[in-house]
Amino acid sequence: MTEDGCSLIGWKEWLALPDLGIPALKAKIDTGARTSALHTFCIEEFTVKEQLMVRFGIHPLRKQNNIELFCEAPVFDRRLVKDSGGHSEMRYVIETTVILGSVQWPIQISLTNREGMMFRMLLGRTALKQRFLVDPGQAYLTGRALAKSYSLSKSRSQRL
């Protein structure tokens, strides 16, 4: 903990998204991204009692597409988001709870296809603000306990 009450984290950390049923996800801590982003596929919108919702799948572990999680969440917003390459994309934005280390709080996450990227999630600066300081020379300062959430072997195809 720093003098101003912020926790120190590394450039990559394990986190959980419990409202979405995601027990563990490796995230890149990205102070250059304003909004957090989650890799998703098969995004479908639907309505429940006049509330716009999205249903989507995620592969929580890179290079293990045999592990699939399917989630549903209310749509918080739709935004035009510019990626690091300067390309703009209209994305669904949801609001959900994140757990990083011992800290739990609500964040906004844009849903996008990050298939070719190293990390399934970017944790952006809006989510980090006034909670964390990032040490770019360190990784997993909150620990790796969440990494053990998936005990499936690479050869088993199963939906969690």
Image (cartoon, grey):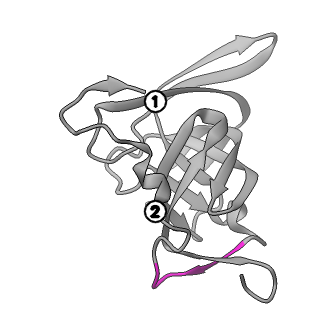
**Which of the 4 image quadrants contains residue 54?**
top right
x 18%, y 34%: residue:
155
Judge from the rendering whether residue 66 lies leftward or rightward of residue 50; answer left or right: left
**Which of the 4 image quadrants contains residue 21?**
top right
Q: What's the distance in space between the residues labelled 2 and 1, CA to CA?
A: 20 Å
Residue identifier under label 1: 69
Q: Is mark 1 on a helix, strand or loop?
A: strand
Three-letter code, disc 1: Leu
x 26%, y 45%: residue:
63
Q: Position of residue 97 (x, y in %)?
A: 71, 45
Q: Is mark 2 on a helix, strand or loop?
A: loop
x 39%, y 30%: residue:
68
Three-letter code, disc 2: Arg
Judge from the rendering whether residue 74 lies leftward or rightward of residue 156; answer left or right: right
Q: Position of residue 122 (x, y in %)?
A: 52, 57
Reply above or below: 22 against 26.
above
41 or 12, which is in the foreground? 12
Judge from the rendering whether residue 88 lies leftward or rightward of residue 156; answer left or right: right
- Which residue range is magenta in the image? 132-138
Quadrant of the snapshot with the C terminus: top left
Answer whether labels 2 and 1 touch (C-beta < 8 Å): no
